Amino acid sequence: MVCRHIEIQDIFSFYLLLDRGCYHKDKYFRPMISVDEATKIVMLTVKGYGSESINLSDSIGRVLMEDWYCDRDLPPYDRVTMDGIALQYDGSKDLADVPVAGVVAAGDPKARLDDPSRCLEVMTGAMLPDGTDTVIRYEDIEITDGRAKINEAYAKYQNIHWQGEDRKQGDLLVPSGTRLSASEIGVGASIGKSVIQVSCLPKTIVISTGNELVEIDQQPKAHQIRRGNVYRIQATLSHLGISCDTAHIKDDQAETIEKLRGFLKDYDLIIMSGGVSKGKFDYLPGALATCGVQKLFHKVAQRPGKPLWFGVHPDGATVFALPGNPVSSFMCLMTYGMDWLRRSSGLTPHENPTAILNEDVTFKPDLTYFLEVKVSIGADAKVYAQPARGNGSGDLANLLNGDAFIRLPQGREHFKKGEIFRIYNYR
């Protein structure tokens, strides 16, 4: 069956989309698919890559694949929270002069106060001595010649962090599927998690294409530019803990096919930049087909990023072929690639936040518009998005003026100040 404008090159991909509920009447006679359809197709290819053991110190940004439980109460003992003196409260408010029986430091074994008419000096973090139930801070006393003069009223049980007050032994602290931040890593250290199980990340390579590109440490000639897209993509992936390789392919069909065959064998995820539009030297779509990559879509009704190409290889590799213009490639990575990676890493789906449009916007093409915006918090504590218009998808410097892309839906031309839309943060 051959249809005019059909985007699926083979029957495998056609039935793949049909089985996944992405087909509807007349869709394959359209030159582009919608953003929602593209998102659905991308998400339907999500797959896990197993788990691995790593050191806790290397786990920032990784996704936990085990449950963490308290190995003992938190805190594990009645803990002094202020430097000062510990004594037995007796209800008297005129107690003003108390002999000091000794000093207890953090890390000392548990001490005992045998005489309730006396006190012990105690340091923050120390075990509360037996025979005491109240701590008075140094700021409220004066110690002279071994006696503590109490200058302020005090309350029973003050300045004590009680054993098990935070969590009990056996309580679930961090569930599997949590992306690890400094908070979780600190907790993991406190319960002895020196080596942990996390989800494996796809072995990834980021590839630039084009004869106009030179390395960033080279001085470009008048007709050349530095290959900044690779570094932007590489830095973005690092937020998920992915350390990726990079490569470059010149505008040569034979070289493109030869290198792609090797990459498809060696990598789980291939992210490419450039070479996917309709130019005479845009060899990627044909080269990917020659290498057996099943195209799931090519071209999305969006701006920027319309030429986005996405597919999978029967042996397992997933391919995102992003447009070469820097704003286009960055937007496609943020709106499709990062969500795919989060899901493949074991994170649960999440809804992107929303923001209030801060001024009227007019956009006439019948496309979903991902507009760069500067995000701020208003005096009313609401999130606002101020358009940061640049000079098109090639204006990479304009990314410095924004914090996110706001998604303005297809089918409209006018978007009013005060309307609420989803945003994709990149800061």
Image (tube, grey):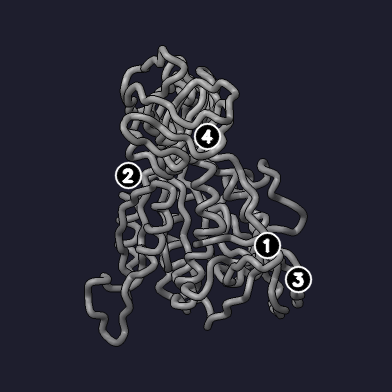
- Residue 424 position (above or below residue 122): below
What crowding class fits label 1: few (fewer than 14 Cα within 10 Å), some (14-19), or many (20 or more)? Answer: few
**316 lies left or right of 367:** left
Q: Residue at x 45, y 71 (%)?
A: 326
Q: Separation of disc 1 and disc 3 at Cα? A: 14 Å
Q: What residue type is labelled 1?
A: Ala
Q: Which residue is disc 3 drawn over? A: 418
Q: What element carries label 1?
A: loop
Residue 401 in the image: above or below residue 97: below
Which residue, given by chain and number where applicable, does mark 2 sit on?
Answer: 266
- Of pointers 2 and 1, the one earlier in the residue sequence: 2
Which residue carries the number 1 mark?
381
Depth check, mark 1 against mark 3: the one in front is 1
Q: Which residue is drawn at 51% across and 62% down?
A: 426
**C-alpha span from label 1 to label 4:** 31 Å
Give residue 110's position: percent from left, percent from top. Answer: 37, 17
The label on residue 177 is 4
